[in-house]
Amino acid sequence: MGRNRIWTAERQTELRRLWNDGKSAAELADVFQTSTGAIYVQARQFGLTRRRSARRRATEESRTRGGDCTGQRRFTGVVSSGPRVVLPEYHPAVVKGTPFFPGQVKPAALLERMLISGENSRKLGRIVEKGRWKSFEIFSLTLEERDTCPRSCTEWRSCYGNNLHHSTRITDDGTLERRLWGELASLNARFPAGFVVRLHVLGDFYSVGYVDFWRQALIDFPALKYFRFYGADAAGSDRFRGRQAVPRSTAAVRHPFFGRRARPYVR
């Protein structure tokens, strides 16, 4: 049978019916013994359009509102995109244990503040919306990835930070803990009912002294709560496990690879 046939009224009606039934252009080409290009040409001529799938509608709506319908985020036009970056074993950041974007590393003394409002984060938002910390303001702290992390981390090459080219990483120039303590004291006075710190968007507990810093902060600042994710490598995350005991109502820790059904556990 020839590939080029006249589009009679009957064939046009059948094309409309099958098109609206969701048949693909390739399937229609087989039915009508023609090319997919000819199918698309006829579809345009007949004014046929595809209905957007539910998934596509949701994606477009998410992009329109920047993935946020709560009004909690400052940058509502920002959406995540692209695959995660996995660095080769010989990359300087992997070998030396430094951030992928060294130009985004800033000394603590040069920053106006280190605890940043969650409204500046696409994922966090300004306040907690449910649970025992509902209505608490959220702040985040970002350190240097890899430089403050154990090399045993299984995400050493594929760190989340490889995709965060805008995030400022704070490096300790000898003033970090002193300045951080001052900011926590200020927030404790400003939000006596409670506030939350998302610890280590990037980076990790880099020393025993730094672990003790946060342990003492939870004691001295009763309004302070924190949550964090710990890495997939238990050995690295357990380096200071014996020194992390804090009241159960003040801190939440979650393994990021357990999936949605995992329950955060509290320390």
Image: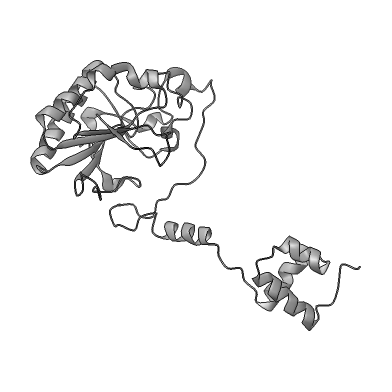
On the rendered image, what quadrant is the N terminus found in? bottom right
* Residue ranking furthest to the right: 1
Name the residue: 35% across, 28% down.
230
193 lies left or right of 2:
left
Foreground pick, 229 / 113: 229
Q: Where 142 sits versus 205, above or below?
A: below
Instruction: Specify the quadrant of the image occupied by residue 156.
Output: top left
Name the residue: 19% across, 35% down.
249
Q: Position of residue 254 (x, y in %)?
A: 34, 33
Q: Position of residue 28 (x, y in %)?
A: 75, 66
* Residue ranking furthest to the bottom: 9
Foreground pick, 248 / 177: 248
Instruction: Specify the quadrant of the image occupied by residue 12.
Output: bottom right
Q: Position of residue 199 (x, y in %)?
A: 27, 33
Q: Where 160 sits versus 12, above or below?
A: above
Name the residue: 52% across, 40% down.
83
